[in-house]
Every structure is written in structure tokens, then in C-alpha cells.
Image (cartoon, rainbow, N blue to C red):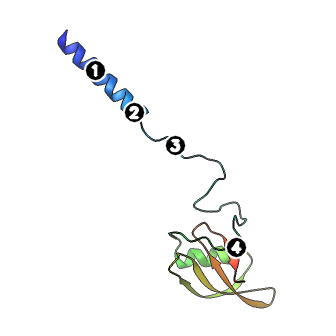
Amino acid sequence: MKRASVIICTVFLAATSAFAQNPPAQSGPNNNAVNSSGQNNSNAPVAGRNSFTEGQAKSKIEGAGYTNVSELTKDNNGVWRGKASKGGSSTEVSVDFQGNVNIAK
């Protein structure tokens, strides 16, 4: 009887600790780490820890319609910055950790 009580208590404690864990992340369009909709969610680069490689940042810029992407460097805010051409004119561009591609204003 004593052994059965110990087993029941152990099972009960294990079950309650499983319910105490954090809920899963929301799947809604709140604050995505990577902007995958193809549209910017910010008009200016968002500072944050950027995991994009230089090649991935270049691909994001090219995916936004720019060509001749050059001089890419990551600044202290985690934003990739460089130069690119679009419509025949050269401009400064950036890619933040969410994948937003913006021009310097």
C-alpha cells in the first residue's frame, strides 16, 4: 500500500510539472524573427542580433530588386549595410535581423 502511494504521488508530480512549462510561441504575425512575407514590417532597420551571413543578406537585398550589391558590413546594431543599384541609380541599403530591406534616408 505504501509503495502504491509513492508511485501515485510520483506520477501526479510528473504530470503537474509537465503542465507548468511555458506555452508554445504564437503562430500569428506579431514580431517575427525573420520577415518571410516579402514585405517590410518596418520603415527603418530594426536593431537586434542578426544571424544572417553576408551571402544571405546579399540575397535578401537582391530579392528586393537590387543589383550590384557591394561593400556589405554588419554594424554594431546587427544591421547589414552596403551599396546597391536599382532603376539605374546607386543607393545605400540595409538588412536587419528580421529581413527588412531598407534604403538609407
Please name the residue that numbered disc 4 is placed on: 63
State the image quarter where residue 32 is shown.
Answer: bottom right
Residue furthest to the right: 87
The local crowd at label 1, few if under 14, some if 14 to 19, many if 20 or more residues have their Cα within 10 Å, is few
The amino acid type found where label 2 is placed reads Ala
Q: Tell which circle, 3 or 4, labels the residue nearer the N-terminal end.
A: 3
Q: Tell which circle, 4 or 2, labels the residue nearer the N-terminal end.
A: 2
Residue 105 location (% of width, % of height): 72, 83
The local crowd at label 2, few if under 14, some if 14 to 19, many if 20 or more residues have their Cα within 10 Å, is few
The residues tagged by marks 4 and 2 sit, at their Cα atoms, a distance apart of 43 Å
Q: Position of 2 compared to 46: left or right?
A: left
Which residue is at 80% across, 90% downward? 88
Please name the residue that numbered disc 1 is placed on: 9
The amino acid type found where label 4 is placed reads Gly
The amino acid type found where label 1 is placed reads Cys
Q: Secondary structure at mark 1?
A: helix
Which residue is at 66% across, 52% downward? 29
Which of the two marks, 4 or 1, is nearer to us in this view? 1
The numbered mark at residue 24 is 3
Q: Is residue 2 above or below residue 91?
A: above
The residues tagged by marks 1 and 3 sit, at their Cα atoms, a distance apart of 27 Å
Pointer 4 with pointer 2, Cβ within 8 A: no
The numbered mark at residue 18 is 2
Which residue is at 71% across, 67% downward? 40
Q: Is residue 47 above or below residue 35?
A: below
Residue 62 location (% of width, % of height): 68, 78
Q: Secondary structure at mark 4?
A: helix
The residues tagged by marks 4 and 1 sit, at their Cα atoms, a distance apart of 57 Å
Pointer 3 with pointer 4, Cβ within 8 A: no
Q: Tell which circle, 4 or 1, labels the residue nearer the N-terminal end.
A: 1
Q: Tell which circle, 1 or 2, labels the residue nearer the N-terminal end.
A: 1
